[in-house]
Amino acid sequence: MSDAPGVLTHAAVMTGRSLRISRRNLDAMITAMMLPIMLMLIFVYFFGGAIETGTAYDSYVMYVVPGVLLLCAGFGSATTAVAVSEDMKGGIIDRFRSLDVGGAPVLAGHVVASTVRNLVSTTLVFGVALLIGFRPAASLGGWIAVAGVLLAYIVALSWISAAIGLLARTPEAAGGFTFFMSFLPYPSSAFVPVDSMPGWLHGFADHQPVTPAIEALRGLLLAQPVGNAPWIALAWAAGILTVAIGLSGVLFRIRTA
């Protein structure tokens, strides 16, 4: 327990370092923030009139925004994999180890910085959604639950991105691997109901980690029944986080051996 203050201090320093790097890499930040907004505008204004959700929502924007919020988390966390891979390739990790900074603070710094970036990006996306007609009806408890689900997924996706950054040998490969994570919202209920998809896709769409999160966010934001969706979503996030932390620890030891 005596090392805990030192670990926390190192993690705080590594978080500050990651945030400063993000501030200097404005093009990546702008891309991570603007891409979800552009996709939301494309779906709402280009395709929204042709998409029939088969639900009682007043407009397509009321249906699609919760999915875009989770899509934003995927795009934002993808930069974590690239940042971790650049650290591993650039040799800075050896310098940190010579200063007695372990792998946990380094990775935690990347994850916390990713979480901060994602929260800023999510707030921006939500603000644009309000401007184009999204009208949430959540209660105070609903807003707290929405924040909890979103935060859980942002942290879980950021940790799995850190593990991908350790697994990939180059930053380019890390960016390619995270594409699959960013792709998950598409075969889900983010943009169209699962029932409208081909039958062979229903099993995957219904039982992948993104669908319960989107259903939970949509129901909570619009004050509709959510059933067990929030708990299922949080269970998925906890499972992903547990695997990601364990895997990143193993991969860090292998890569720095």
Image: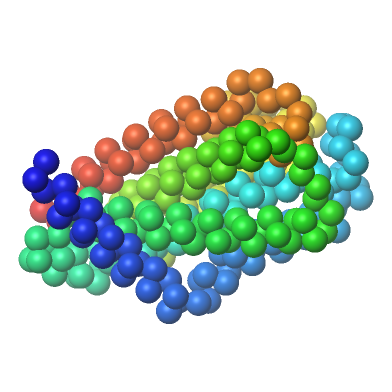
- The chosen color scheme is rainbow
Which corner quadrant of the image does residue 63 belong to? top right
Q: How many marks?
A: 0
Q: Position of residue 38 (x, y in %)?
A: 71, 63
Q: Position of residue 117 (x, y in %)?
A: 49, 61
The answer to whether 200 is drawn above or below residue 176 in the figure is above
Find the residue positioned furthest to the top.
227
Residue depicted at 86% across the width and 32% down the height:
55
Residue depicted at 50% across the width and 31% down the height:
234
Residue depicted at 53% across the width and 76% down the height:
27
Residue depicted at 9% across the width and 60% down the height:
100
Q: Quadrant of the N terminus?
A: top left
Which corner quadrant of the image does residue 91 belong to? bottom left
| Residue in the foreground of this view, choosing between 246 and 114 | 114
134 sits to left or right of 99: right
The answer to whether 69 is drawn above or below residue 20 in the figure is above
192 sits to left or right of 5: right
121 sits to left or right of 156: right
Residue 150 visible in the current orientation: yes
The answer to whether 185 is drawn above or below residue 211 in the figure is below
